C-alpha cells in the first residue's frame, strides 16, 4: 500500500481514470493502492454505500472504495500522514504486532505519566526571544521543524543522537532522577520482552556433485592394409607362402579390434555406474534434507509463536516509552542552533551541529506569531 498523490485542495474532487466522478467536499484525500478483499478482512463489511462507493466510516478516518479499483481516504480528522499510518496499521501493513487502539492506549498512559515529569526548559528573556525571532527571519538559525525528513533530526543535531535529552541512568550511590524512577516503574508495569527469539533458516539444499567427464572413446581400430594383403596373396599364388599367413594376418587385426571394442564398452559401463552411484547418494542426501527441513519448520512454528508474544511485549514497552517521552517533552517548543556553529560536514543538504539550544512551548508559540508578523511586514515593505 503506498501513497500515490496527496491532496492539494481544501475541497477535493475524486478522480477515476482522469474523469471527474463526484465532489465530496472533504478537506483532503489520499489515494492508496490496495489488494482485493483486504478491507473486508481487516475492517469488516462496509458501513455504507454512496454513489457506487463502499464507505468505511471509522472513528478517525473515512475510507471510500471506488468501483474502478482504487481507494480514497478522507484525512480531515487526523491529517494525511497520520491517516496513512493508521490505515497501514489497521490493514495489517504496520511493523507493529499490537493493535493500533491498544498501542494508543499504552501511549496515552505513557503521556500521562510523562506529563508529571516534564523536561525543564527555562523561558527566554524578552531580549533573547526578540533576537531569536530576528535570527530566524534573517536565516541565521536552523530549527528542527525546518527539517522535512524527521529521521534526520538526530543527525543534524548530533547531541540528540548521543542521548542529550535522555534520562541518565543513576550512578552508584547517587539518588536517581524522579523521571528515571517514574519511567522505570512505568516500563516495569508490563512484561519485559527479553531477548528476541530468532527463527532459524532452513538448511540449504545439498549440492549434487558433478558427473565425471565422459571417458574418451578409443579410435585405434585397424583395417587390413590392401598393399600387404595383395603381397601375401601374390606369395600364396606363386607358392611362396601358405594360406595360413593371410589368415594369421587378418586374425591379428580382428583380435585387436575385439580388444578395443571391449575396452570401450567396459569404460562406458564403469562411467555409467559411477554416475548411478552419484545419483543414489544425492537422492539419499535429499531425503535427509527434507527430514531436516521438516524438523526445522516444526521448531520454527514454536519460535514464531514465541516471537509474536515477544513482539506484543516489545510494542507495549515501546508505546509506553514513546508516550512517556512525548509527555516529558511536551514543554519543548523547538530545538535550534545558529548556522555559524555548524560542523564542517553536512547531511542531505542540512548542516550538522555539535550543540543545540531549546525553546519552551510558551516562548515558541509567541515567537511563531512574531515571526509571522515580521515576515508579513517584510513582504509588504514599500520602497
Image (cartoon, grey):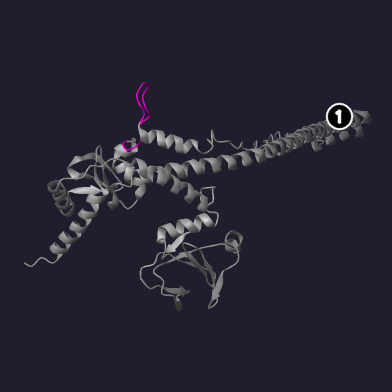
Q: Is residue 80 left or right of residue 224?
A: left
- Quadrant of residue 180 within the rendered picture: top left
Residue at the left extreme of this rendering: 383
Q: Is residue 108 above or below residue 279?
A: below
Image point 36% across, 24% down: which residue? 171
Along the line of sight, which residue is nearer the eye, 46 or 161? 46
Q: Residue 193: name its quadrant.
A: top right
| Location of residue 256 with respect to 325 vertically, above or below | above
Foreground pick, 250 / 40: 40
Residue 329 falls left or right of residue 139: right
**Residue 279: percent from the left, percent from the top?**
76, 36
For label 1, the crowd category at 10 Å Cα-Cα, with few meaning under 14, some 14 to 19 and many 20 or more, is few
Q: Compared to 185, does 319 lie above or below? A: below
The answer to which of 44 and 180 lies nearer the viewer is 180
113 drawn magenta: no
Disc 1: which residue: 252
Picture layout, residue 296 above or below residue 22? above
Q: Pinpoint residue 207: horizontal percent, then vertical percent.
A: 67, 36
What is the magenta range? 164-176
Residue 329 position in % (x across, y down): 33, 44
Badge 1 marks a residue whose secondary structure is helix
- Residue 199, percent from left and from top: 60, 38
Amino acid at each position: 500500500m503506498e501513497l500515490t498523490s496527496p491532496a492539494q485542495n481544501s475541497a477535493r474532487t475524486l478522480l477515476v481514470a482522469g474523469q471527474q466522478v463526484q465532489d465530496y467536499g472533504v478537506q483532503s484525500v489520499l489515494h492508496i493502492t490496495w489488494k482485493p478483499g483486504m478491507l473486508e478482512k481487516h475492517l469488516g463489511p462496509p458501513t455504507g454505500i454512496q454513489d457506487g462507493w463502499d464507505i468505511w466510516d471509522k472513528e478517525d478516518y473515512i475510507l471510500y472504495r471506488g468501483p474502478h479499483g482504487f481507494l480514497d481516504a478522507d484525512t480531515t480528522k487526523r491529517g494525511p500522514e497520520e491517516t496513512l499510518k493508521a490505515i497501514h496499521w489497521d490493514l495489517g501493513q504496520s511493523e507493529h504486532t499490537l493493535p493500533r487502539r491498544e498501542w494508543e492506549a499504552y501511549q496515552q498512559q505513557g503521556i500521562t505519566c510523562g506529563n508529571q515529569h516534564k523536561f525543564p526548559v527555562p523561558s527566554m528573556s524578552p531580549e533573547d526571544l526578540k533576537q531569536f525571532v530576528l535570527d530566524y527571519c534573517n536565516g541565521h538559525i536552523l530549527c528542527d521543524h525546518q527539517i522535512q525528513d524527521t529521521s534526520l533530526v538526530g543527525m543534524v543535531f548530533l547531541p540528540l543522537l548521543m542521548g542529550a535529552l535522555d534520562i541518565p541512568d543513576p550512578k552508584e550511590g547517587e539518588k536517581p532522577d524522579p523521571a528515571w524512577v517514574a519511567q522505570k516503574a512505568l516500563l516495569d508495569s508490563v512484561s519485559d520482552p527479553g531477548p528476541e527469539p530468532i527463527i532459524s533458516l532452513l538448511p540449504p539444499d545439498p549440492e549434487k556433485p558433478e558427473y565425471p567427464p565422459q571417458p574418451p572413446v578409443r579410435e585405434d581400430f585397424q583395417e587390413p592394409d590392401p598393399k600387404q594383403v595383395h603381397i601375401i596373396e601374390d606369395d600364396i599364388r606363386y607358392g611362396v607362402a601358405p594360406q595360413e599367413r593371410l589368415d594369421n594376418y587378418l586374425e591379428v587385426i580382428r583380435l585387436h579390434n575385439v580388444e578395443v571394442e571391449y575396452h570401450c564398452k567396459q569404460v562406458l559401463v564403469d562411467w555409467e555406474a559411477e554416475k548411478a552411484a552419484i545419483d543414489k547418494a544425492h537422492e539419499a542426501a535429499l531425503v535427509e534434507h527434507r527430514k531436516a527441513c521438516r524438523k526445522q519448520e516444526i521448531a520454527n512454528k514454536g519460535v514464531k509463536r514465541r516471537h509474536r508474544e515477544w513482539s506484543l511485549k516489545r510494542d507495549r514497552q515501546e508505546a509506553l516509552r514513546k508516550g512517556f517521552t512525548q509527555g516529558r517533552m511536551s514543554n519543548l517548543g523547538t530545538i535550534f542552533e545558529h548556522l555559524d556553529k555548524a560542523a564542517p560536514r553536512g547531511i542531505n543538504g542540512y548542516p550538522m551541529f555539535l550543540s543545540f539550544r531549546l525553546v519552551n512551548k510558551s516562548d515558541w508559540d509567541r515567537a511563531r506569531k512574531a515571526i509571522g508578523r515580521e515576515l508579513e511586514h517584510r513582504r509588504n515593505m514599500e520602497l
